[in-house]
């Protein structure tokens, strides 16, 4: 059985693009681009919580990095470097080879250098720390939404949750919905290009990891505002509505932008080849925090729900 260091050397040491010193020493050395600020984020993926124990290792490798890249997208940052700490129940080379293939496929797509980490024996989980760059004062924050701003979301939220519901036999999806929803669950696509394009355009942004309403609620809390939502095509009841509003794992971007810049946001649809949907507007005050129109068009307060690691599953 190969040693820890042999596994690292064989599957996680690769040529770097913009790193002074990468894997192999007690620490890595990086040189940020001149005039840039660093953005740093950490996420952990735990077996049974964030992925199924029998998850395909190549898909899991992709997702392990992609969910962290999504944090950079939400900040308007260009992802640059990443370190990976992994606990594995056994040094099964065939599994590790597939995992590393997916992990580096994501790294290559977004031009990210893998510069270090750690491995240990234990229940399967992965902890990634990612570093990105952004010009001073241009990072997208959660705290900038203002009354009158439009609320937008990218892509098609709810697909990942529907894919998971299908795997759990809570719903039966037919093609092509099944393939699209399972791809959204297993191979999320971080919206880096959108995040970069939103610099100077969006007033606030967040990635949708715990559910649209729950994550949008973070923007409202940090910005000390409320929102009125009117989501096109939202079913009045049922599992699709639940998944679109409260399902996690989409890693799309929810963001706010001034209504006066609506045309500039809409222009990004063609430029990026990405669906962008205006789903509401920001209102002043903090109560009621979030409202939807009732059958007569009158605003009715709703209480956001989403995934909470230390709660009952709802915020």
Image (tube, grey):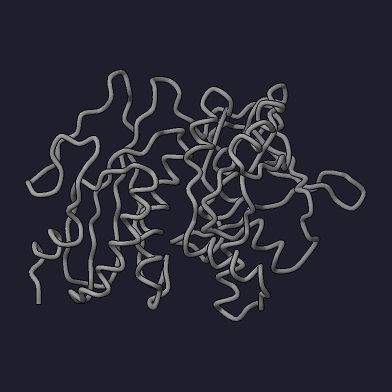
Left or right of 127: which side holds 138? right
Quadrant containing the C terminus is bottom right
* Residue 285 image point, x, y percent: 68, 31
Left or right of 125: which side holds 220? right
Which residue is more in the foreground, 277 or 314? 277
Residue 150 picture quarter: top right
* Residue 19 image point, x, y percent: 20, 36
Residue 159 picture quarter: bottom right
Total tally of numbered discs in the picture: 0
Q: Which residue is drawn at 17% across and 71% down?
A: 121
Q: Residue at x 65, y 38 (%)?
A: 269
* Residue 163 image point, x, y percent: 58, 69
Which residue is more in the foreground, 25 or 89? 25
Q: Residue at x 38, y 44 (%)?
A: 110
Left or right of 139: which side holds 28? left
Quadrant containing the N terminus is bottom left
Task: Work out whether 237 lies above or below 272.
Answer: below
* Residue 276 image point, x, y percent: 66, 42
Task: Work out whether 295 lies above or below 289.
Answer: below
Residue 54 picture quarter: bottom left
Residue reaching furthest to the right: 296
């Amino acid at each position: 059985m190969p040693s820890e260091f042999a596994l690292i050397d064989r599957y996680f040491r690769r040529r770097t693009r913009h790193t002074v010193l990468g894997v192999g020493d007690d620490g890595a050395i990086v040189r940020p681009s001149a005039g840039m600020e660093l953005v740093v984020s950490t996420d952990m993926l735990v077996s049974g919580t964030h992925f199924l124990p029998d998850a395909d290792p190549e898909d899991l490798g992709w997702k392990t990095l992609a969910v962290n890249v999504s944090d950079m997208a939400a900040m308007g940052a260009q992802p640059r470097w990443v370190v990976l700490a992994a606990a594995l129940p056994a040094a099964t080379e065939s599994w590790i080879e597939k995992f590393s293939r997916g992990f580096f496929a994501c790294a290559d797509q977004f031009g990210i250098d893998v510069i270090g980490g750690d491995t240990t024996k234990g229940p399967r989980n992965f902890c990634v720390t990612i570093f990105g760059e952004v010009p001073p004062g241009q990072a997208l924050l959660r705290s900038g939404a203002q009354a009158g701003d439009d609320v937008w979301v990218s892509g098609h939220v709810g697909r990942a949750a529907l894919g998971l519901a299908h795997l759990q036999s809570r719903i039966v999806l037919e093609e092509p919905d099944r393939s699209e929803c399972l791809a959204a669950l297993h191979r999320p696509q971080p919206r880096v290009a959108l995040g970069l394009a939103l610099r100077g355009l969006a007033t606030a942004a967040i990635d949708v990891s715990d559910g649209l309403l729950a994550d949008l609620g973070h923007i409202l809390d940090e910005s000390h505002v409320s929102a009125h939502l009117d989501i096109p095509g939202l079913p009045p009841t049922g599992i699709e509505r639940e998944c679109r509003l409260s399902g996690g794992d989409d890693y799309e971007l929810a963001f706010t932008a001034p209504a006066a810049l609506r045309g500039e946001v809409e222009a990004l649809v063609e430029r990026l080849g990405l669906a962008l949907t205006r789903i509401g507007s920001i209102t002043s005050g903090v109560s009621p925090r979030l409202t939807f129109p009732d059958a007569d068009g009158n605003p009715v307060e709703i209480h956001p729900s989403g995934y909470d690691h230390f709660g009952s599953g709802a915020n």
